[in-house]
């Protein structure tokens, strides 16, 4: 195998790979812009003291959203779900840009109040987008790629997304620095040419830009469905045949069946060990990352005395994350997926997390925390996501879409709440004891993570070898030695 072949894409797949990578780039660009606006707008309109309340309410709000999404899965095709996600949030972005420009409802009104309903609605809107971004893209990608395609191309999809994140984050930083008059000769050029920017103009422009990126994503999906041949849009063949055989005439309405279909994804998670294993992978990462993020925040707050310096710190943090994610996905994930087995790849990220936790234990400085956190986030997007998503390929539509929605949207926030509760309890002790307990807890999680990943890898490989469908019948984690 030549070095060049580790990144090569056959001509017949180039359009498909390019459009999927561009779709993910547009989605990530929107996330990079909107993520930075979420807390800052809410804090100025409603009040920073209400951020914890907003997090709790958003968790509750996600339940009906997931139920609604589950119903859409039953009535819409896979690409139509992408249209609903991108176009709905795009229109929402433009609407909120208009509302924020209003002199009393928007950010021109600088008096924070818990009654500013636009601030609350915008926060929940951003949470909805973040919660379903990964689910929407990866569920679609998993349904149109075969296992071999996933090994060859998923790293490239993530690399494309990181390019979108880097360009959006750096452009936003430059735009804001120019707008607030803090970029030397560049700002002077705009000022001398009578170009001025108000806070309202800056924020609404960024919000509308993110909405425009989503329209770009929907155009990419349309082009994918129109110009890529149908035989290149078939996913795992065994799943395709199962879903095709399930098609039948519409049945009379039943309230029981309607309610059951709404929670099918959750029922599969709690009843199916393989799906529960995938759910646990998300819990492991987000719990560890939440604890590390609190340590990063504490160290950054002590090292940066002003709001401006702290903002610059976090801007550098997220930009570093995207840069790390790009290099890991393109130069590590893409070639390694073509060399190593799925089982080996599944063990790499938890092993990396364990090494990161050990590094934090021995070198708990602000610089180490910054580097470890940025690398973990970058490796999560660049290495963990494309590998973890492969676990969904030999599964049914219910698992790919419904169970994944519960995992990505609800499970992630449960993990963050659990990590927050743990940190809150241990932080009341002395710093040395708190540090010891936290790192011991995180090491325990990574140890269990490695074991679960091992058995998930064996089950995945067995399904692919036997051309079986996980979820179509009772499939347990394979705990028997191979013959």
Image (cartoon, rainbow, N blue to C red):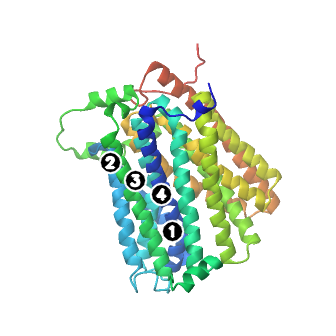
Estimate the x, y position of residue 147 in percent, counting from the top left.
Answer: 48, 30
Q: Earlier in the sequence, mark 2 or mark 3?
A: 3
Closer to us: mark 2 or mark 1? 2
Spatial CA span between label 2 and label 3: 9 Å
**Neighbour class for label 1 at 10 Å: few (<14), some, many (≥20)?**
some
Q: Are marks 4 and 3 in contact (CB under 8 Å)?
A: no
Q: Kindly identify which residue carries mark 3.
A: 217
Q: Which residue is mark 1?
A: 38
When the figure is inspected, residue 376 is found, relative to residue 468, above or below; the finding is below
Q: Are marks 4 and 1 in contact (CB under 8 Å)?
A: no
Q: Residue at x 32, y 26 (%)?
A: 241
Residue 13: percent from the left, percent from the top? 43, 34
What residue is disc 2 on?
222
User: Is residue 256 among what the camera can see?
Assistant: yes
Which of the 4 quarters of the picture holds residue 169? bottom right
Answer few, some or many: residues within 10 Å of disc 3's Cα (few below 14, many 20 plus, some between 14 and 19). many
Looking at the image, tell me whether mark 2 or mark 4 is earlier in sequence order.
Answer: 4
As displayed, is residue 479 above or below residue 36? Answer: above
Q: Quick check: 378 left or right of 413?
A: right
Spatial CA distance of label 2 from label 1 is 29 Å
Q: Tell me how far mark 2 sits from mark 4, CA to CA.
A: 22 Å
């Amino acid at each position: 195998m030549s070095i060049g072949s580790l990144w090569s894409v056959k001509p017949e797949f180039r359009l498909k790979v390019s459009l999927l990578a561009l779709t993910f780039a547009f989605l990530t660009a929107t996330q990079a812009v909107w993520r930075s606006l979420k807390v800052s707008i809410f804090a100025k309109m409603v009040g920073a003291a209400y951020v914890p309340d907003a997090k709790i309410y958003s968790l509750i709000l996600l339940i009906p959203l997931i139920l609604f999404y589950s119903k859409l899965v039953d009535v819409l095709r896979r690409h139509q779900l992408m249209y609903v996600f991108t176009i709905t949030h795009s229109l929402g972005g433009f609407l909120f840009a208009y509302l924020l420009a209003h002199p009393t409802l928007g950010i021109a009104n600088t008096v924070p109040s818990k009654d500013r309903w636009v601030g609350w609605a915008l926060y929940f809107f951003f949470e909805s987008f973040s919660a379903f971004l990964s689910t929407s893209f990866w569920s679609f990608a998993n349904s149109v790629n075969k296992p071999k395609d996933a090994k060859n191309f998923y790293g490239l999809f993530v690399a494309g997304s990181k390019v979108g994140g880097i360009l959006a984050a750096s452009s936003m930083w430059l735009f804001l620095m120019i707008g607030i008059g803090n970029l030397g000769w560049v700002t002077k050029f705009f000022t001398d040419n009578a170009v001025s920017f108000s806070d309202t103009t800056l924020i609404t422009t960024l919000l509308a830009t993110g909405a425009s990126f989503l329209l770009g994503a929907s155009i990419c999906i349309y082009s994918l469905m129109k110009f890529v041949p149908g035989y290149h849009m078939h996913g795992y063949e065994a799943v395709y045949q199962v879903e095709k055989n399930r098609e039948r005439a519409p049945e009379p309405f039943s309230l029981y069946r309607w309610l059951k279909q709404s929670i099918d994804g959750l029922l599969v998670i709690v009843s199916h060990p393989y799906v529960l294993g995938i759910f646990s992978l998300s819990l492991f990462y987000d719990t560890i990352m939440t604890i590390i993020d609190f340590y990063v925040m504490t160290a950054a707050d002590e090292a940066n005395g002003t709001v401006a310096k702290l903002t610059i710190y976090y801007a550098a943090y997220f930009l570093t994350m995207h840069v790390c994610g790009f290099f890991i996905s393109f130069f590590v994930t893409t070639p390694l997926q073509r060399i190593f087995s799925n089982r080996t790849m599944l063990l790499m990220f938890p092993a990396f997390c364990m090494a990161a936790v050990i590094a934090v234990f021995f070198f708990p400085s602000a610089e180490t925390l910054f580097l470890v956190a940025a690398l973990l986030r970058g490796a999560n997007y660049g290495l963990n996501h494309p590998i973890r998503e492969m676990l969904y390929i030999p599964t049914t539509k219910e698992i790919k879409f419904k169970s994944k929605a519960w995992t990505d949207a609800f499970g992630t926030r449960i993990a963050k709440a659990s990590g927050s509760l743990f940190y809150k309890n241990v932080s009341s002790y002395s710093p040395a004891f708190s540090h010891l307990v936290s790192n011991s807890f995180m090491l325990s999680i990574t140890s269990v993570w490695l074991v679960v990943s091992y058995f998930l890898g064996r089950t995945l490989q067995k399904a692919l070898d036997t051309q079986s469908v996980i979820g179509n019948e009772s499939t347990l984690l394979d705990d028997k030695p191979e013959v």
